[in-house]
């Protein structure tokens, strides 16, 4: 996910921040093995609930949105670097996405919630829009962010508000996950993750509006790269200050509506598409708040030295994302230590923070000795196989 094109330190650090927040969420979820520790003390159960709600308020649906935004930005940086050399990067980028899909399938063996395969498929949308003008790309991104499919479902529900709707399709698959993740067979866990687990995630991504949101964020990230919105300078700081103010004003009413929607709308047929649309917009707005705060703190000099610690992690985001799945599955699943049985959200948050700190230290150590992370190096070499490789 790191680029060998022009490096922007703030982007590396922001990507590192997303990796850390994903690590924390995955840990408190036991890497999607949902299990509540029985007979936990009342005070610990209450604390676990607070930790869970705070973590998902801050990062749920936002960390992957940051990843998607930076994915589109990286595409622009790589394309621009090749364009300056008189080359068209699009065919090579399609091959690069195919390799990423392979990494994603390997990652999915350990964690079915893998996002790499989804990014690899949806990333193909950047190829036809790469030559479109800024206005056209922005308009298309806005339409996708509006969740057009859910809008159609909502329009139909307005005509038939009393119709009974079934459970989301993903629930059928999620209900089977614990059967093989709690078991002691790693082969059964891998098989389940690659079949039942992948279908669960695909359906869930569609049902929650993630597909349209990711496509939109890819395009917005590409536009951010074109406009140089992460380059240091007074214009950048001014843009992110305005973004912070606007996103905050947008988030507050959206989050209020999201919270009160179950009380306001009795019809399930109406409530489900409305909840998907509002949640998508709410997460997008808060993601912009996080990104704006991060950039302002980093480029404003207030916390640059502290936040720069995350940059090596961001430069090795593919390696870091993959290894956290491998380590996390061994820690929590039945074929490993099986800690899902005894760890609530509070203890899992501590484990996640420790793992994130260790990853940061490892990435800094590795990059003092190598130009890229191990998986980044493999990805780079495979991308440019049978071609002149860029420096």
Image (cartoon, rainbow, N blue to C red):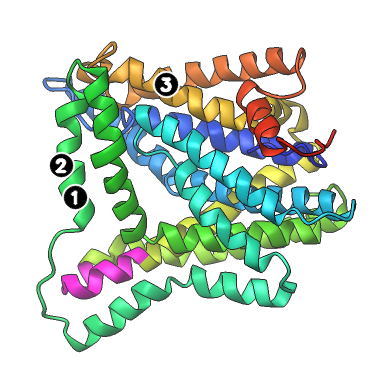
Q: Magenta span covers which residues?
A: 263-276
**Residue 315: quarter of image:** top right
Instruction: Count residues near mark 3 (Cα–Cα under 10 Å), then give few for <14, some for 14-19, many for 20+.
Output: some
Distance CA(mark 3)–CA(mark 1): 25 Å
Q: Is residue 41 above or below residue 98?
A: above
- Front in this rendered view, residue 66 or 71: 71
- Front in this rendered view, residue 335 or 301: 335
Assess whether residue 268 is covered by the magenta stretch: yes
- Circle 2: element type: helix
Residue 153 % position (x, y): 29, 77
- Front in this rendered view, residue 130 or 98: 98
**Mark 1 touches mark 2? (CB < 8 Å):** yes
Is 346 placed left or right of 68 in the picture? left
Mark 1 lies on residue: 171
- Circle 1: element type: helix
Instruction: Count residues near mark 1 (Cα–Cα under 10 Å), then give few for <14, some for 14-19, many for 20+.
Output: few
Mark 3 lies on residue: 326
First reached walking from the N terminus: tag 3 or tag 1: 1
Residue furthest bottom as drawn? 159
Residue at 25 percent of width and 15 percent of height: 335
Mark 2 lies on residue: 175
- The quarter in which the N terminus is drawn is top right
């Amino acid at each position: 996910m790191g680029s060998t094109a022009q490096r922007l330190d703030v982007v590396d650090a922001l990507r590192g921040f997303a990796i850390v927040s994903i690590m924390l969420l995955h840990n408190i979820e036991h890497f999607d093995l949902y299990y509540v520790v029985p007979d936990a003390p009342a005070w610990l159960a209450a604390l676990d609930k607070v930790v869970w709600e705070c973590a998902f308020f801050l990062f749920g649906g936002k960390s992957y949105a940051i990843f998607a935004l930076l994915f589109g930005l990286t595409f622009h940086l790589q394309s621009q670097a090749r364009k300056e050399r008189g080359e068209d990067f699009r065919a090579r980028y399609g091959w690069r996405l195919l390799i990423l899909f392979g990494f994603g399938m390997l990652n999915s063996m350990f964690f079915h919630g893998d996002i790499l395969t989804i990014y690899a498929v949806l990333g193909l949308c950047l190829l036809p829009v790469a030559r479109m003008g800024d206005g056209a790309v922005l308009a298309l991104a806005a339409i996708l962010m509006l969740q057009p499919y859910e809008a159609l479902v909502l329009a139909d529900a307005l005509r038939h508000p009393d119709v009974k709707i079934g459970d989301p399709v993903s629930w059928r698959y999620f209900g089977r996950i614990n059967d093989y993740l709690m078991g002691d067979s790693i082969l059964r866990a891998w098989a389940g993750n690659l079949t039942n687990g992948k279908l669960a995630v695909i359906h869930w991504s569609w049902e929650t509006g993630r597909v349209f949101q990711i496509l939109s964020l890819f395009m917005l990230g590409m536009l951010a790269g074109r406009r140089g919105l992460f380059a240091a300078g007074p214009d950048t700081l001014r843009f992110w200050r305005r973004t912070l103010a606007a996103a905050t004003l947008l988030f507050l009413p959206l989050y209020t509506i999201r919270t009160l929607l179950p009380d306001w709308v009795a019809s399930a047929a109406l409530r489900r598409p409305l909840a998907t649309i509002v949640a998508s917009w709410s997460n997008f707005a808060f993601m912009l708040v996080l990104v704006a705060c991060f950039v302002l703190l980093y480029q404003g000099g207030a916390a640059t030295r502290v936040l720069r610690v995350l940059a090596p992690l961001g430069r090795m985001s593919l390696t870091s994302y993959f290894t956290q799945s491998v380590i996390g599955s061994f820690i929590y699943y039945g074929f490993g230590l099986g800690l899902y049985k005894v760890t609530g959200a509070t203890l899992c948050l501590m484990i996640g923070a420790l793992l994130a700190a260790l990853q940061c230290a490892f990435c800094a150590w590795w990059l003092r000795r190598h130009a890229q992370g191990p998986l980044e190096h493999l990805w780079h070499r495979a991308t440019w196989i049978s071609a002149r490789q860029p420096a």
